[in-house]
Image (spheres, rainbow, N blue to C red):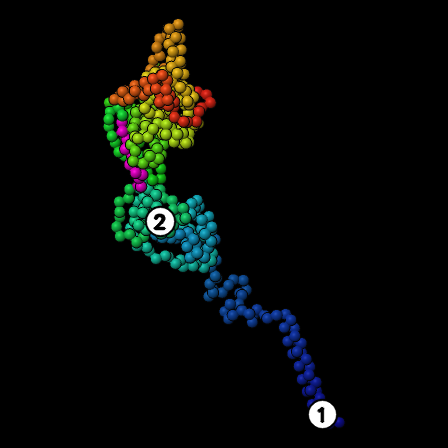
Amino acid sequence: MSLQPRWQMVQLMALLAFTAAAWMIAVTARAAGPSEAILAPPGSLAQDDGEADAGVEPEEAPEADAKPPEYVVQPGDSLSEIAEAHGIRTAELVAANGISDPDDVHAGAKLKIPGAAAAPKKVAKRPKALEGVRITVPKGVTLSRIAEIYDIPWKRIAKANGLGATGRVRAGQKLLIPGASKILEIVPCLKPPVTLYRVRTDETRTVSLCRCNGEPTPEGIEVLSAVSAPPRQPVPFPLHERLVRLLQRVAEQYPGKRLEIVSGQRPRKESQKNESLHNKGRAIDFRVEGVSNARLVTFVRKLDQVGVGYYPNSVFIHLDTREKDAYWIDYSRPGEKAIYGKAGMKAEEIEKIRLARKAAATESPEAPATEAETDVDVEATVDVGTLADLVQAAVAESLASPAEAPAEAEAKAAPPIVTPIAVNVVPEG
């Protein structure tokens, strides 16, 4: 047998064995995964001591306590716009800054933007700066009044200043008036002036008692207090604000009519037992020019939390402010002790009461009542000055006998139609 064929057979066998070995190595390597040498880039293989190569810097970890950035509020900004520009919700912005009133955020305030440090910051798109003038809100002025003076919609001012839908402003607050070129004088809106006539001194004053929102003006309180104070004496104390509001209601009910003041404040005397509402600046005796007292009483009784006194034989009515409504009728003459009664009492009934009092005084004479003892809320002991003749004439008419003037005397003597009271009312001061 020749050696050449045998040698070829050996070579073929060796080739097959090498191929099989290579195939086994490849299968084993694929199952084990890539080696560190293959994965690691040049120069980055781990050293024997486990340290990293000095040529590669480790990546810096972000600071855990990084503070969120701040945003300075610009004129015309609103919380919703700021939150939208930074990619967060308005509620998140409010909570992060401890804002109790979202409408009370002003230009120049610094706001923390939560979440901006952990996520890519969105560039805030600031609104275009509005042109206009800046004003300081005076006391007693509303946003609607400011808008009226500058002749622009109040909602436009509210939006420019981030006031929200309420449009609420406070005294001293800075406001941007968009589109305005100059600062205008801002005065509170005042209700039409009321003419006040002081009966005792024949003095007339005209003043706006209240602002348009119903709040009494300082000047109105001062003038009304002076007109209703005792003549030729310093004003003891100002009238209560609510009493001023009540008289404003009366003035609005009878526009153009002057209010004629008889009596108001009465300083409390040492000998006085009970404190009157007149002593507290909460009561006033007055009438309205050209309006009957019966008609006036009918109106003021519709007001809430008031005391109303009607005096058929006098020239004024009584009005005070109190927590519980009260109404009484006093048939006494000026300077006489009160004679309380129901509506519709006739002159004969009233005269019987007077005669009974005289008889009782004759049987058991006592010292006459002092002014302090009769000084209660429903008293009629007031000086009507030059009106004494009118009072005497009214009393004479009310006491006329039926024989002298049967129909006319009875008609004049009967009080006007008002709702009768169940019992005589003598309210406490």
Type of the residue with mark 2: Trp
Q: Which residues are magenta?
A: 188-198
* Residue positioned most to the top: 363
Mark pair 1, 2: CA separation: 113 Å
Q: Quadrant of residue 123?
A: bottom left
- Residue 206 vs 392, above or below: the answer is below
- Does the segment drawn in magenta span residue 194? yes
Q: Name the residue: 51% across, 70% down.
A: 41
Q: Residue at x 36, y 32 (%)?
A: 246
Amino acid under label 1? Pro
Most foreground residue, 203 or 361: 361
Q: Residue at x 56, y 71 (%)?
A: 38
Position in image of residue 373 (x %, y %): 36, 15
Q: Residue 127 location, x and y as percent?
A: 36, 57
Query: Which secondary structure lies at badge 1?
Result: helix
Residue 303 seen: yes
Image quadrant where one finds the N terminus: bottom right
Name the quadrant of the C terminus. top left
* Residue at left offset 66%, top offset 78%: 23
Which residue is situated farthest in the right direction here?
A: 1
Crowding near the residue tagged with mark 1, few <14, some 14–19, many ≥20 C-alpha atoms within 10 Å: few
Q: In the drawing, does residue 114 fall left or right of residue 19?
A: left
- Where's residue 109, x and y in %? 37, 49
Q: Nearer the viewer, residue 348 or 210?
A: 348
Position above or below: 405 against 157: above
- For residue 5, the mark is 1
Image quadrant where residue 406 sits: top left
Position of residue 87 measured from the top left corner of the image (x, y, whole percent): 45, 57
Q: Is residue 419 above or below residue 171?
A: above
Mark 1 or 2 closer to N-term? 1
Badge 2, how many Cα within 10 Å: few under 14, some, many 20+? some
Q: Which residue is mark 2?
A: 154
